[in-house]
Image (cartoon, helix red, strand yellow):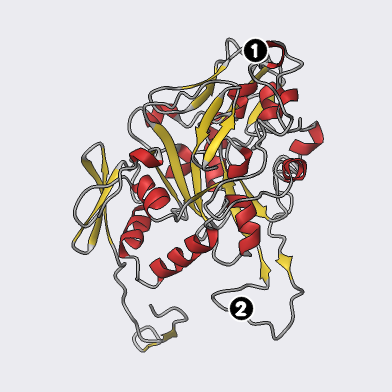
Amino acid sequence: MPKVENWHLNREMEYPYEDARPDNQWAGVFDLNKCIECQTCTLACKTTWTHGEGQEHMFWNNVETKPYGSHPVGWDGRLLNELGEAEWDEDGTYQGDTIFEAKGTDWENPENHPTNNFSSSADNLAGFMPGDNDWRYPNLGEDEPAGEEMTGDMHFDDDTHPIWFFYLPRICNHCTYAACAGSCPVQAIYKRQEDGIVLIDQENCQASTQCNEACPYKKAILNPKEGVSQKCVGCYPKIEEGKVPQCFENCLGKIRMHGYINHPDDADVGDPNEEIVNPIDFLVHEKGLAKPLYPQFGTEPNIYYIPPITAPVDYLTQMFGPGVEEAIETYQAARNGEEPEIQALLHLQGSTEWSLTGFKIEGDEAVGYYEGDEVGRVPIEEPQTDRKRYDEQEDVYRLDIT
């Protein structure tokens, strides 16, 4: 049975094909503490890529409210119910089954291999096929909170929020072990060797819908008008020019950072006060601040999330895997000025249209680089000015004086 190494799980796992990591892996980091669900990212993607016939229901980028929002309906809850509660050892090793292992498929048996026939491909993976009604409610559960009942004397502090929700922006994760590619019976889905972007060959796709069923994030979607499946393309025309994807560039909250991630054994980390280091590696490998979405699925997704600091840790651990509590503590430390390197890097988020392949701290400024060239420079601490609450010249009172 083919075995591949999945560092998110801290163990080997079963997968239909042999391990073949790309030369460079496209990746991103989203800071969930700053997302305001303005949906500017969604509209930027929609107007660029999914404005044609048969794409009306498609949102390659969407932002949903957790814990109750999901597009399509129940995309994560249904699969979590099938896999069961995620179990992790103290050393971060996942003990449960991935979507490739849950049904006990023998991937070396030709009868069970995805390339065999249309009927058996996705049947060998945990998952489900969304129905038409599941795509009709992109704003399901929007701003719907969880927790205790609101009372007039309720107090919110920095550590716990009795009532909570947060926004989760989602795109294709361009997974290292993509379930869409692993399930396609005609091998129309492939991962680019130069950057790890996962694409569907529109000429070879035969609309078997196996990828639609197998993708645990439901980001491979059938276009019934064209008779093909389609998905986020990682804005590869922009990536090839060194620029960030549309949803990254248009993010008003500046929560997104695009770059490339290395395997932990090859991580480009160090002291940004002394040398240029990889910003994605720094946040994921060095600081453990950014986490993958549902790592227990086994796909090794390449979008990483900085967990929200106001949601319950047990819920976040189910969503982002082990180390969430430490990530929240690190983020709080950065907010308090105790992690100036993180503070500097997060200020670089959204400051440039270029992908960041490196960053360094120079004095009181953070400097971003793309392939060795400087593409962004921001102050580590934003300059502030305190104004008088009452302005005699204008005869007005100010609510915001800083």
- The spot of residue 253 in percent (x, y) is 47, 55
Task: Please give left or right for residue 198 compared with residue 269 in the image.
Answer: right
Task: Please give left or right for residue 32 compared with residue 274 in the image.
Answer: right
Q: Residue at (66%, 58%) from the top-left corner?
A: 315
Examine the image and state in which quarter residue 170 appears.
top right
Q: Residue at (74%, 81%) from the top-left corner?
A: 151
Q: Nearer the viewer, residue 346 or 11?
A: 11
Dot 2: element: loop
Task: Please give left or right for residue 336 compared with residue 144 in the image.
Answer: left
Dot 1: element: loop
Identify the amino acid type marked 2.
Phe
Q: Residue at (41%, 69%) from the top-left corner?
A: 333
- The spot of residue 280 in percent (x, y) is 38, 46
What is the distance, in whole Å, between disc 2 and disc 1 at their CAs? 54 Å
Examine the image and state in which quarter residue 143 appears.
bottom right
On the image, numbered disc 2 is attached to which residue?
156
Residue 55 seen in the current view: no
Mark 2 in CB contact with mark 1 (< 8 angstroms): no
- The spot of residue 56 in percent (x, y) is 68, 31
Q: How crowded is mark 1: few (under 14 residues within 10 Å), some or many (20 or more)?
A: some
Q: Nearer the viewer, residue 31 or 287?
A: 287
Residue 63 seen in the current view: yes
Q: How crowded is mark 2: few (under 14 residues within 10 Å), some or many (20 or more)?
A: few
Q: Residue at (61%, 51%) from the top-left corner?
A: 88
On the image, numbered disc 1 is attached to which residue?
115
First along the sequence among labels 2 and 1:
1
Identify the amino acid type marked 1.
Thr
Q: Does residue 362 sit above or below 293 in this rendering?
A: below
Q: Does residue 387 sit above or below 178 in this rendering?
A: below
Examine the image and state in which quarter residue 9 appears.
top right
Q: Quadrant of the C terminus?
A: bottom left
